[in-house]
Each structure stands twice: as C-alpha cells, then as structure tokens.
Image: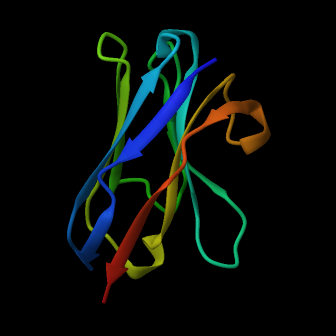
Amino acid sequence: QVQLVESGGGLAQAGGSLRLSCAASGRSISSYVMAWFRQAPGKEREFVARHSRSNTIYYAESVRGRFTISRDNAQNTVSLQMNSLKPEDTAIYYCAAGTGTSDRRSYNYWGQGTQVTVSS
C-alpha cells in the first residue's frame, strides 16, 4: 500500500508558476511509475505527466515545455513544477503511483488532490 498526499496548490495568475509536491508513505516509490493527472470541473481526469523507474518522462501535449515532473526516491517524493500557467490549467491535480502508461486505469494509488486555479 502506498499513501500519497499532495500539497502546493493554490491561486496563480496567468503566466505565473506553482510547484506541486506529493509525499508518499507506506512503500518506496522506487517500485512505481509516478504520475500527475488533473481533473477540471465537468471533465474527465486527464494525464499530465509521468516519470518511470528508469527516468523516462512523458508529458501531455498541452503541458509539454511548461511543466516539469521530477522524483526523489530517497525522499519518497514527486514534484510538478508548473510554469507559464494558463487559465485552462485550472483543475484538481492528483498524484498517482502505478505500473505506467497515460491511462489512469494503470495507477492503483491516488492522492486526495490539490486545487490549482489560474486567473486570467
């Protein structure tokens, strides 16, 4: 079992930055692909970024070049640096641990989510 707790969400202006963190407990994240997803009101949860155990990184097209995912296995944490934020980035952001891919069904463990709101 892995417990995930996100932090760092909040309100930002368009063009600004936020950094999300995800602290894991229960098991080492080194065994998992770690990912970030987001869900905007009225929309399905969508893939944002993932970081494999072999340090392969994938981003959704909508965030590539603006967001950076990183992991620290020693600290059991995952982060998402979000730059050049846009109003369409407004969503609840979730940290997830699983076996990989961009499909949310491949992730067994989820945090409770943290709200990110970007004003224009």
Q: Residue at x 54, y 41 (%)?
A: 111
Task: Give me the residue at 54% from left, 37% from top.
Answer: 35
Residue 74: quadrant of the picture? top left
- Which residue lies at the image location 30% right of the left edge and 66% below the top edge? 10
- Give the vertical position of 14 relative to 59 (above or below): below
Q: Position of residue 87 (x, y in %)?
A: 40, 81
Of 64 and 120, the residue lying toward us = 120
- Please say whether residue 75 is visible from this viewpoint: yes
Quarter of the figure that contains the N terminus: top right
Q: Where's residue 15, x and y in %?
A: 23, 75
The quarter of the image holding the C terminus is: bottom left
Q: Residue furthest right?
A: 105
**Residue 22 location, quadrant:** top left
> Is 108 on the left or on the right of 79, as rendered?
right
Q: Is residue 120 left or right of residue 26?
A: left
What residue is at 44 percent from the left and 38 percent from the top?
A: 5
In the rendered view, would you say 70 is above or below 44?
A: above
**Front-lying residue, 3 or 36:** 3
Q: Residue furthest bottom?
A: 120
Residue 103: image x %, image y %?
A: 74, 42
Residue 103 appears in the figure: no
Q: Position of residue 57 (x, y in %)?
A: 47, 31
